[in-house]
Amino acid sequence: MSKIKIAELFYSIQGEGRYMGVPSIFLRTFGCNFKCQGFGMPRGELSTEADDLASVHELYPYPKYENLPLVTTGCDSYASWHPDFKELSPMMETSGIVNRIMEILPHRRWEDEHLVITGGEPLLGWQRAYPDLLDHPKMAGLKEITFETNGTQKLTPEFKESLIKWKITNHQLNRELTFSVSAKLPCSGEKWEEAILPEVVCEYEEVGTAYLKFVIATEQDFADAECAISAYRTAGFKGHIYLMPVGGVESVYSLNNKAVALIAMKHGLRYSDRLQVPLFKNEWGT
Ligand code: SF4
């Protein structure tokens, strides 16, 4: 039986991208190869909010995710990768994860809900465990999965094969596999050469539908997105492109959501909202 370190497992509405509005189970794995400390910061500056909260946590531990403060800058899911919060993420056997999913599904079985495997970076270390999870008999009715990834992790040959098999098993279900790739632009604080890896993302299109989602706030960010789009298209990427506003909290999101929607319209690209911010204030577990 495989195990996965689970930062969060909850039921909500997908707030972003292709499945916006679809009732979804979110499985948030622990661990990420990035920190994204540049989000919401002036260019060239890095947020220290996650590290500051880690110092507080060391002195006065937050007992659960629900107690953790939200941040206005940097990665809004910092506790899913920051090593100082790792004890809040239990290592769970896949059968335990499946049982918990059944408990929180409205009808105690899969119907029209979709599964979002997110992070952290969900393709970083857990690819070997997903086949056990997806092949569990109680997961047989699942029709749609999205991996929310930063697009830097290659699929192992074994995992790739298991995903192709998953899609065609129970073929009457018309299963759909999606990679929602939030490629990190310089405004994230990550380095271009480590974040923009078109050949990795093109490989996702061999097993499912992939789309790119660029988080931006300004025209300068969009200029970076255009360079990235050109690199992905040159490599052969065929999927849709979404622009999504920076902002894990309403005060930041509402500053730039309309401007980003207008940039998307001007350039004929898709706009992705982040419905979890206006609907649920982006609290943990939403
Ligand atoms: S890639 Fe995603 S989870 Fe990882 S640090 Fe960046 S925003 Fe956070």
Image (cartoon, rainbow, N blue to C red):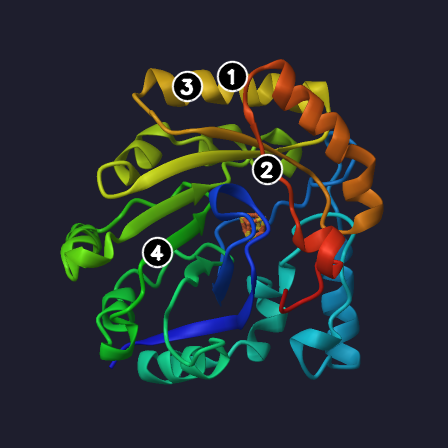
The amino acid beneath tag 3 is Ala
Q: CA distance from mark 2 to mark 4?
A: 19 Å
| Marking on residue 227 | 1
Q: Secondary structure at mark 3?
A: helix
- The earlier-in-sequence mark between 2 and 3 is 3
Q: Is the distance from the Cβ of mark 3 to the nearest ligand 1 atom less than 8 Å?
A: no
235 relative position to 220: left or right: left
Q: CA distance from mark 3 to mark 1?
A: 6 Å
Circle 2 is placed at which residue position? 272
Residue 169: where, in percent of width, then height? Answer: 15, 60
Q: Name the quadrant containing residue 116.
A: bottom left
- The earlier-in-sequence mark between 2 and 4 is 4
The amino acid beneath tag 2 is Ser
Circle 4 is placed at which residue position? 144
The answer to whether marks 3 and 1 mark residues whose Cβ atoms lie closer than 8 Å is yes
Residue 127: where, in percent of width, then height? Answer: 29, 60
The answer to whether marks 3 and 4 mark residues whose Cβ atoms lie closer than 8 Å is no
Q: CA distance from mark 2 to mark 3?
A: 21 Å
Mark 2, other Cα within 10 Å: few <14 / some 14–19 / many ≥20: many
Foreground mark, 3 or 4?
4
On-image quarter of the C terminus? bottom right
Foreground mark, 4 or 1?
4
Q: Name the quadrant containing residue 130.
A: bottom left
The amino acid beneath tag 4 is Glu
Circle 3 is placed at which residue position? 231
